[in-house]
Image: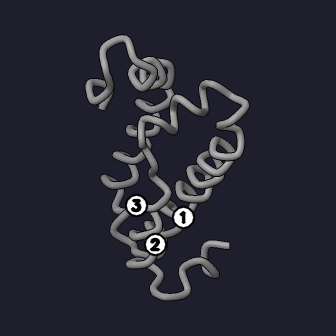
Amino acid sequence: TTEKGAEGGLFRACMKAIRSAHKSANRLRAALVLSGLFTDKKIYREVIALFYVATNTMEKKMIALKEEDEICYKMLSLGYRFGPQYEKDLQTLYGGDWKVAVE
């Protein structure tokens, strides 16, 4: 994923900065998959909901700060938005009332 950003760019710098935490999260996800927990739809959708809440909150905060914070502006200008993709997954996993279920 790091290579998707421009050499010397903000995306690569951010990915390098979170590399250790991201590696740990990936290991945790792999352990959950291997243990069979992600085969349980209820557990899987709850985990996705938690990632969505954290991601969506961060993205909303960045949008609110983009005019006064140069880093938020630059990050948003890259066009990366993950909340909408989580929303599609949650729609599939929870159905029509996914927003109520996630709240």
Is residue 74 depicted above or below 47 in this figure? above
Of labels 1 and 3, earlier in sequence is: 1
Q: Secondary structure at mark 3?
A: helix
| Direction from residue 65 to residue 37 in the image, left or right | left
The percent position of residue 1, horizontal first and vertical second, equals 30, 32
The residue lying toward the viewer, choosing from 70 and 22, is 70
The residue lying toward the viewer, choosing from 90 and 29, is 90
* Mark 1–mark 3 CB contact (< 8 Å): no
Tag nearer the camera, 1 or 3: 3
| Direction from residue 56 to residue 4 in the image, left or right | left
For disc 3, the neighbor class at 10 Å (few under 14, some 14 to 19, many from 20) is: few
* Farthest left residue in view: 3
**Which amino acid, by three-letter code, is at mark 3?**
Gln
Tag nearer the camera, 2 or 3: 3
Q: CA distance from mark 1 to mark 3?
A: 12 Å
Placement of the C terminus among the 4 image quadrants: bottom right
Q: CA distance from mark 2 to mark 3?
A: 9 Å
Is residue 98 depicted above or below 44 in this figure? below
- Residue of label 2: 90
The percent position of residue 50, horizontal first and vertical second, equals 58, 58
Q: Secondary structure at mark 2?
A: helix
Q: Residue at x 34, y 46 (%)?
A: 30
Quadrant for residue 4, please give it.
top left
* Farthest top residue in view: 8
Quadrant for residue 19, please give it.
top left
* Mark 1–mark 2 CB contact (< 8 Å): yes
Of labels 1 and 2, earlier in sequence is: 1
For disc 2, the neighbor class at 10 Å (few under 14, some 14 to 19, many from 20) is: many
- Residue of label 3: 85
For disc 1, the neighbor class at 10 Å (few under 14, some 14 to 19, many from 20) is: many
Q: Residue at x 60, y 25 (%)?
A: 71
The percent position of residue 75, horizontal first and vertical second, equals 51, 32
